Amino acid sequence: MIVLGIESSCDETGLAVYDSQQGLLAHVLHTQIALHGEYGGVVPELASRDHVRYLLPLADQVLKQAGITKAELDGIAYTAGPGLMGALMVGACTGRAMALALGIPAVAVHHMEGHLLAPMLEDTAPEFPFVALLVSGGHTLLAEVKGVGQYELLGESLDDAAGEAFDKTAKMLGLGYPGGPILAKLAEKAESGVYKFPRPMCDRPGLDFSFSGLKTFSLNTWQKEIESGNENEQTQANICKAFEEAVVDTLMIKCRRAIQQVGAKTLVIAGGVGANLSLRKSLQAMMEKEDGELFYPRIEFCTDNGAMIAYAGCLRLVAGETEPLAINVRARWPMSDLAAI
Ligand code: KG4
Ligand code: ZN
């Protein structure tokens, strides 16, 4: 089965063609970073309009790269949530209409399920069951994954998602958008051991997270340094490092707890923050000590992309799942609502 995947839930237009026999045939991505940059964050209406501009030309481009025609497609998968309503509507309407015109089935994909299954696109893919750490701009959660659609929530963020905390902290430090990768890059220039930030919620049992306090801690530290006349790039870098270390350490501690709690030997990280190299390094070292294995997607499939949607959609289409003609998108969509396949 050959599936066209469409991702348009936020600030990236991603399209891909996945073949259940041959794997990923092609993928293309248009990022809206330049568009939102001057506003310091995503402007939803601008995001929707940009998806309208790019989606169809990118669909032509990805099919060409895959070396197939529209007539050879067997199904279309689009992100139906969670995400920005307008942005989701563009991908869903286009995908659903295309499927109708071509007389093929369409399937609505959960964005976070896409992220969660993205490591399966790699040559060495994890096997079920495993524990997944999903860390993106909108979500931070730990789940026990027994199969596709079988997600048991172990813990989640009670306030900001990890990516959101990266983005807001970067913004407070005047570093621009998108904050996560910029903050991580600047942290590389830090002097070691200047600050030690707290590891929130690690001193009590449980697998939930809270990152909003760390963001405030960073702001207070920065303001104190400004008052002391230390408003310079080195101070910013040192704060970035202390913030990153605190987030990474907290995520590592909770992941270790989660795999010990469920007796898992496999940990999967996915979502935009999964692109963070310090996080990968820390989780790798932890899993080696635990005598287990860590899996993650290549960097470009950690952040939003069409390949993960084409793949998750293909699995669901093969299992016989299809969408009716109505176009449904959801800003919020608990993963527990997904059917097991
Ligand atoms: O998965 P994603 O592309 O979109 C959502 O589904 O939200 O994740 C985007 C998030 C942003 O918050 C971004 O700052 C963060 O992932 N991010 C990073 C890095 N690369 C992306 N955070 C920390 N370090 C990175 N290298
Ligand atoms: Zn995402």
Image: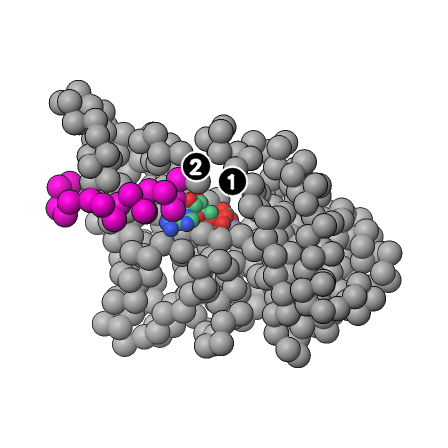
Which residue is found at the position 74% from the left and 49% from the top? 56
Tell me the residue at 27%/76% (across/down).
291
Asked if residue 182 lies in the magenta stretch, the reply is: yes
Q: Position of residue 174 (x, y in %)?
A: 34, 30
**As drawn, 121 above or below 172:** below
Mark 1, residue position: 33
Q: Which mark, by number, is residue 177? A: 2
From the viewer's perspective, is residue 192 above or below residue 102?
Answer: above
Question: Magenta segment, which residues?
Answer: 179-195
Magenta-drawn stretch contains 34: no
Front residue (pair 234, 158): 234
Q: Secondary structure at mark 1?
A: helix
| Crowdedness near tag 1: few (<14), some (14–19) or many (≥20) residues, C-alpha within 10 Å | some
Q: Quadrant of residue 306?
A: bottom right
Q: Quick check: 133 left or right of 311? A: left
Q: Position of residue 268 (x, y in %)?
A: 41, 65
Taking 192 as reference, is 45 left or right?
Answer: right
The image quadrant where one finds the C terminus is bottom right
Q: Judge from the rendering whether residue 285 lies leftward or rightward of residue 13; answer left or right.
A: left
Return the disc, 1 or 2, that comes first in the chain's sequence.
1
**Secondary structure at numbered mark 2:** loop
